[in-house]
Amino acid sequence: MNRMNQPFAFDADTEWETAGEGIRRKILTYNPQVMMVRVAFEAGAIGVAHSHPHIQCSLVEEGVFDITIAGRTERLKSGDSFLVPSNAVHGAVAVEAGVLLDVFTPMREDFVAAER
């Protein structure tokens, strides 16, 4: 379902999609300027190091993660958050199963290309 400019996203109506081995995501609300995405990791799952032009803010909703941003690694747990500057190389390792809530600006067009 295309959620572009929709004011509400209901969890029960939002499907998970595979985003890597042991990783799945739900695209929530978004418009051209901002996008919110929930990402669930199985224990041990690795969000491989990558970069993108978007600024990313993330909240650890559940679990424990080792987050690396521009060569610095910190262990984050539920309630902790992090900021990824534009084009910074970053990645995640799920020390325990968990969920990240990611916010991107501008929106990740590559995440919704299949919806169009």
Image: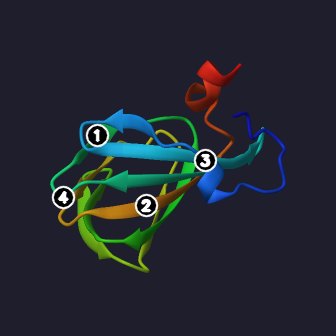
Q: Quadrant of the C terminus?
A: top right
Q: CA gap, disc 3 to disc 4? A: 23 Å
Q: CA gap, disc 3 to disc 1? A: 27 Å
- Residue placed most toward the observer, 93 or 20: 20
Q: Are marks 1 and 4 in contact (CB under 8 Å)?
A: no
Question: Which comes before the other along the chain, label 2 or label 3?
Answer: 3
Q: Are marks 3 and 4 in contact (CB under 8 Å)?
A: no
4 sits to left or right of 42: right
Question: Which comes before the other along the chain, label 4 or label 2?
Answer: 4
59 sits to left or right of 67: right
Q: CA gap, disc 1 to disc 4? A: 17 Å
Give SS at disc 2: strand
Residue that mark 2 sits on: 100
The numbered mark at residue 14 is 3
Residue that mark 1 sits on: 49
Relative image position of residue 75 (x, y in whole percent):
24, 71
Residue beneath the point at 54% across and 43% down: 15
Q: Amino acid at mark 3?
A: Thr
